[in-house]
Amino acid sequence: MNCSFYQIGGFQPHIQWWQAGRGWSDDKKLVEEIAGRNSPLWPHNGEPIELVLGIKRTGTSHLLLSERQVRDMIRAYRQPFPRRSIHALEFESLSPIYLHSKEEFEQIFGRLKIKHIKGRTPWDNSQENKAFSTSEYHPERGAFEHGRLFYHILGGKGRIDPGKFNLHDLSWADGVKIYSFAISLRSPDTRPSQDRINHPIALDCGLAQATLDLSYCETSAIHYIFYNHRMLGAGSPKLPFVHGETEELDDVTISARLRDFFSAHIHEGSKGGSKPIVLLVHNEVVSMNMLKNCGVDTSSWKSGLRDLLNFSALQDHRNDYRRRDGPRYRDDRNRRESSNGRTERSRSPRPSTSGSQLRYDSPPSRRTSFAPVYVVDIKPHYTALIQTTTASESVTAIAGPLGLDLVDIKGWCAGNDAVTMFKIWHAMVSGPSINEQRELRIKNRDPKLRAAMIAATNLVTPRNDSDFDPTTITLPTQEAINHDDSDYGESSNSDD
């Protein structure tokens, strides 16, 4: 399946049917025809218009129409088929974006508008993308949208068409289980930073399970306090576990309990075939080191949902065809070989892909297996949303700014945190796209968070576009995703 999309608005759009002169598009006309009352894109059942949000590896956002939507527009407005398109493989993530009115689309469209500066080479200096218009890799933005797509697949909205988002294998969706794992770390911990990362000292740990709509499964939460470390949390008080009974056990017993927990659930999933686990954590590196030090085998686990949603395979498929010539990977500049061996332009131009001008004629092969566990770190999701690391060092620190009401956040209880993680992730992935949420939260959130988010924007948003060099932008980045067969290497045991 050749899954191509057509960009509307933004930098170098594919849809340029309504020209206002000098090559500029009539944006008002385009907005009216896309989301106005008479648009052919409105579903007959009264649902909102569903567009596709594509986020590239650099973090830039692009509004996309599917090929079917473009054909509906062509029939309605008698316009020519666009000469250019872009393939799904060019994006880090593809996710739904919903339009309930023309005014809503106008706001989203406006944030992607390019400012034309006389005498300067055009580039993507839109409000939405100018902070990401470099070659630096920003996986956290695509990872946020992977979460939204995952939520929609499992019935959070129940309206997406998998094929529209290049999803060819959803055999995992019926059997996937969602768990969380939380730990409270020793405080203060004066050891060198690398020791704190590689050999974290936990005061307690918590586990919980959620339903497919991310609601907490009552009575599923487990809370263990490390008896040996119970006096090492002098920096803050211990809070009562409100979801069940706490057990105080020694390190060896808790390690065995954790090994048994994951072994049992992974074995149960493997018996039924495609039944992977999605595991929420806060601070993935430390959490995985904690589990490995307890003897849990994480060697075949995967980081993020990218691989589960098959975006990793799509990217590998794309890179494979970039490395070799052949009938499945060819330059699509409407050229053909004549009988005398000379290359000449075809008389029948066909739509081509933008940027690299590549065509991909077949999807990657269907997977035969899944990783047992896909680990989702809620911390980079949150920092990607607000574009600052402010107030992200604990589960409760994130929960407050997201509007989640907690009785008492000044203290530690990993059992409570394990349940709170579901609420945090639900608050982010059940909402609009990362860009829309950021705008809404700036407007509606408490003054402290709003000030932090605006300050972060000012750090990466130049005040004078004419003096701005996009190559000078720097942003706080998350660790790049490790694309080896295992994202966590070999499991190890440690008594530390």
Image (cartoon, helix red, strand yellow):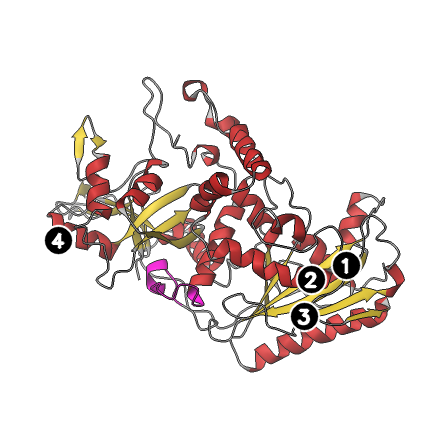
Amino acid residing under circle 3? Ala
Q: Is residue 479 left or right of residue 343?
A: right
Q: Find out whether the residues at labels 1 and 4 contact each other: C-beta distance under 8 Å.
A: no
Which tag, 1 or 4, sits closer to the chain's start? 4
Task: Depth check: give the residue in front, 272 or 299.
Answer: 272
Distance between the alpha carbons at the discs numbered 3 and 2: 8 Å
Q: Find out whether the residues at labels 2 and 1 contact each other: C-beta distance under 8 Å.
A: yes
Q: Where residue 239 is drawn, which disc sits there?
A: 1
Q: Where residue 416 is drawn, which disc sits there?
A: 2
Say which of marks 1 and 4 sits in front.
1
Which tag, 4 or 2, sits closer to the chain's start? 4
Classed neighbour count for the residue bearing mark 2: other residues with Cα under 10 Å, few (<14), some (14–19), many (≥20)? many
Classed neighbour count for the residue bearing mark 4: other residues with Cα under 10 Å, few (<14), some (14–19), many (≥20)? few
**How far from the left and from the top, in percent, is residue 81?**
17, 48
**How far from the left and from the top, in percent, is residue 117?**
34, 21
**How far from the left and from the top, in percent, is residue 437?**
46, 46
Distance between the alpha carbons at the discs numbered 2 and 1: 9 Å
Pick out the residue farthest to the left: 78
Distance between the alpha carbons at the discs numbered 3 and 4: 55 Å
- Is 166 one of the magenta-colored residues? yes
Find numbered disc 1 in the image and state the secondary structure of the residue it sits on.
Answer: loop
Find numbered disc 3 in the image and state the secondary structure of the residue it sits on.
Answer: loop
Task: Provide the residue span drawn in magenta.
Answer: 153-168
Distance between the alpha carbons at the discs numbered 4 and 2: 55 Å
Say which of marks 2 and 1 sits in front.
1
Q: Where residue 221 is drawn, which disc sits there?
A: 3
Distance between the alpha carbons at the discs numbered 1 and 3: 15 Å
Question: In this figure, which residue is indicated by the disc labeled 4?
Answer: 75
Classed neighbour count for the residue bearing mark 1: other residues with Cα under 10 Å, few (<14), some (14–19), many (≥20)? some
